[in-house]
């Protein structure tokens, strides 16, 4: 079995330990003193969960890394926000799509740059 699942290791100030998480299994976590042990622990827990799912015939979640994305999705927002964004796009001489996609990309970059490191 290939393990293509999405893992994240972060610090839990509340527990004073590192926590291992898996995006495809949001109910699972593994708390331990070191980042390496958190990764190892959550991977083992996911393998055990997958074995249980296989034994009962339950389908396993598809890894995010193995999914295909079109690059398109629909966002619903209040009309006032839509209008404000349309005005900003017009003032900048770009399409609404270009303005919003650039803002999302910048927000993701900032989020990844400022994410706490374990």
Image: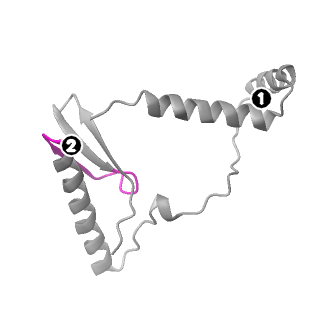
Crowd tier of the residue under label 2, counting other residues whose Cα lies within 10 Å: few below 14, some 14–19, many 20 or above: some
- In the image, which disc is placed on residue 35? 2
Query: Is 98 colored magenta in this rendering?
Result: no
Q: Position of residue 29 (x, y in %)?
A: 25, 49
CA distance separating discs 1 and 2: 42 Å
Residue under circle 1? Answer: 82
Which residue: 15% across, 41% down? 34
Q: Position of residue 63 (x, y in %)?
A: 44, 63
- In the image, which disc is placed on residue 108? none
Which residue: 20% across, 29% down? 14
Could you say which is closer to the camera, residue 75 or residue 42? Answer: 42
Which residue: 68% across, 49% down? 73
Q: Position of residue 42 (x, y in %)?
A: 24, 54
Q: Residue lying furthest left in this view?
A: 33
Q: Secondary structure at mark 1?
A: helix
The C terminus sits in image quarter: top left
> Does 111 appear above or below 6?
above
Q: Earlier in the sequence, mark 1 or mark 2?
A: 2
> Does 107 appear above or below 60?
above
Q: What sort of colour scheme is used for the picture?
A: one colour
> Does 114 appear above or below 2?
above
Magenta span of residues:
22-35
Crowd tier of the residue under label 1, counting other residues whose Cα lies within 10 Å: few below 14, some 14–19, many 20 or above: few
* 30 on left or right of 97: left
């Amino acid at each position: 079995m290939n393990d293509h699942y999405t893992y994240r290791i972060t610090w839990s100030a509340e527990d004073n330990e590192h926590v291992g998480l898996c995006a495809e299994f949001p109910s699972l976590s593994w708390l331990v003193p070191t980042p390496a042990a958190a990764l190892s622990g959550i991977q083992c827990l996911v393998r055990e969960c997958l074995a249980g799912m296989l034994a009962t015939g339950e389908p396993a979640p598809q890894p995010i890394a193995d999914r295909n994305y079109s690059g398109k999705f629909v966002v619903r927002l209040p009309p006032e926000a839509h209008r404000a964004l349309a005005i900003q796009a017009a003032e900048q001489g770009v399409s609404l799509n270009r303005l919003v996609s650039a803002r999302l990309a910048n927000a993701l970059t900032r989020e990844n740059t400022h994410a706490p490191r374990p």
